Image: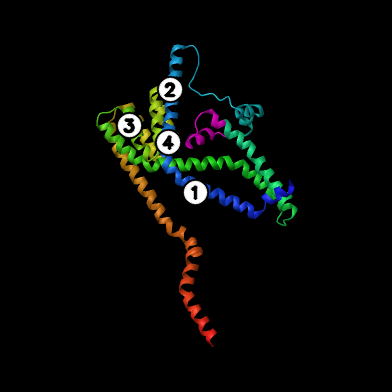
Amino acid sequence: MKELAYTLMQPANLIAVLVAVLSFLAVLTLLRSSVSGEQLDKRMKAVAQRREELRRQARQTLAQPGQNSGLRQTDESLYKRIVDRLNLKTLLEDPKVVDNLAMAGFRGPKPVTTFYFFRFLMPFVMGAFATFYIYVVNDFGQPPNIKILICVAMFVAGYYAPNIYISNAASKRRASIVTAFPDALDLLLICVEAGMSIEAALQKVSQEIGSASIELAEELSLLVAELSYLPERRMAYEGLARRTNYPGIKSVCTAMIQAEKYGTPLGTALRVMAKENRELRLSAAEKKAAALPAQLTVPMIVFFLPVLFVVILGPAILNVMDMMHKK
């Protein structure tokens, strides 16, 4: 067993496994375009289920006014029992965990308990893996204090690993939403000026924008459901702004709240907001383009210049070697 573990933990074998995993992820990324429609249907089905749950619970609240039934989901999973048994929500308390999970697309109590469970588990998993590798498989000739430092660093990295995963997922989701949001605003403006209600317009835009951004289509469909069943419509707009955490969407939500509160024309506000969001998208693209030369400096030095030197100096070196051979 020890020989098998030693073989599996060799640096060459680990590199081979890493290359295989990266290759699989690359193929999976290429295949995602063919299943985007299925992902959209799946997310829209989840939003429809959420809408039906809100409708059912709202009816129960109206039928039983003396009871505080609420609209919160319940979680009865194994993670929930472990988190409650160990009191992890108090031990690993994070006041921003709900908002961060919502920005990453995870809603409800179940993702919260799952987050706390893995935040408790991952330090021990990564610390045990580092300890086993350093003290059993290969210590790289390091002194004892460096070994202990590596194990402690892996333990700390395991504690922050769930936060890093959630942060990356939220960044990718926000980038997808921000890219398609100005186009969604243009479609929304057309629907509103055509005489459609805001709920019907949002529902129509969510159906049309799904091919460009599944995440934005999901958020707009969820906004329609919350507009119908939350006690105040302002809560639905504030929830969208909180889940996306983007200044352009926050300004649009504020404009919609003010339009419904004071009766101002919604079409004019949407036209101004659409223009501002297009300018924000353009400025973000210009910022990336301006930073591109500095980011390409190191790859050009590492990859392009050696090849350029070989192409330019290679023939001259070969000619010199032929002349010296003839002599």
- Does the CB distance between marks 1 and 2 fall below 8 Å? no
Q: Which mark is residue 41?
A: none
Question: Judging from the image, what secondary structure is the residue with disc 3 in?
Answer: helix
Give the x, y percent position of residue 118.
Answer: 61, 36
Lower position in the chain sequence, tag 3 or tag 2: 2
Residue 93 appears anywhere in the view: no
Q: Mark 3 to mark 1: distance in Å?
A: 34 Å
Q: Decide: marks 4, 2 in contact (CB < 8 A)?
A: no
Crowding at dot 3, Cα within 10 Å, few <14 / some 14-19 / many 20+, comes out as some
Judged from the image, the secondary structure of the residue bearing numbered disc 4 is helix
Q: In this view, does 252 lie above or below 302?
A: above
Whether the residues at callouts 3 and 2 have beta carbons within 8 Å, the answer is no
Task: Read off the magenta span.
Answer: 93-112
Residue 97 falls inside the magenta stretch: yes
Residue underneath mark 3: 204
Q: Percent x, y for residue 184?
A: 34, 38
Label 1, on which residue? 26
The quarter in which the C terminus is drawn is: bottom right
- The amino acid type of the residue labelled 3 equals Lys
Which mark is nearer the camera, 3 or 1? Answer: 1
Identify the residue under disc 2.
52
Name which residue type carries label 4: Glu
